[in-house]
Image (cartoon, grey):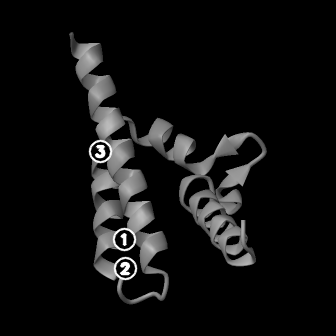
Amino acid sequence: MTRHEDYMKKKATDLLDMVNHPPHYTTGSVECLDAIKSALGDGYVHYCQGVILKYVWRFERKGKPLEDLGKAEFYLKELQKFIEDKLEEDE
C-alpha cells in the first residue's frame, strides 16, 4: 500500500468514527444518542427527521460535505431501524 493509500484509509476511518460514534458524544458508557432516544420515546422519529434536514441543508456550507452527508445517512439509517423495530413490536 502506498503512503497515499494509507493516508486515505486513515482519513476514511477518522470520518467514520466522527460520523458513527464521535467520542465527544459519550460520557462514561452512555452515548448521548441513546439518552435522547430513551427520553423522547416515539418522538425520536421527529428528532431524526430534523437532524437529517439539518445535515442535508448545510452540507455545502461547512467545509466538510462528506462528513455532513455521512451524518445525514447515519440518522436516516437510525430512523429506518427505529421504524422497523416499531413495526415488529406492533405485530
Disc 1 crowd, CA 10 A, few/some/many (<14, 14-19, 20+): many
Residue 85 visible within the image: yes
- The residue under label 2 is 59
Q: Secondary structure at mark 1?
A: helix
Q: Amino acid at mark 1?
A: Tyr
How many numbered tags mark residues here?
3
Q: Residue 55 bears which disc, if any?
A: 1
Q: Secondary structure at mark 2?
A: loop
Quadrant location of residue 52?
bottom left
Q: Nearer the viewer, mark 3 or mark 1?
A: 1
Identify whether 69 is placed above or below 82. Answer: below
Instruction: Name which residue lies at 45% across and 87% down.
Output: 62
- The residue under label 3 is 45
| Mark 3 / mark 2, whichever is N-terminal | 3
- Measuring from the top left, give residue 20's x and y in whole percent: 55, 53
Q: CA distance from mark 1 to mark 2?
A: 6 Å
Quadrant location of residue 15?
bottom right
Residue in front for this viewpoint, 86 or 16: 16
- Measuring from the top left, give residue 60's x and y in whole percent: 35, 86
Question: Which residue is farthest right?
Answer: 28
Locate the C terminus and report the quarter of the image it occupies: top left
Q: Amino acid at mark 2?
A: Phe
Is label 3 in contact with label 1 (beta carbons under 8 Å)? no
**As drawn, is 2 to the left or to the right of 58?**
right
Quadrant location of residue 51?
bottom left
Q: Amino acid at mark 3?
A: Val
| Mark 3 / mark 1, whichever is N-terminal | 3
Is label 1 in contact with label 2 (beta carbons under 8 Å)? yes
Q: Residue 15 bears which disc, if any?
A: none
Instruction: Name which residue lies at 44% across and 62% down.
Output: 71
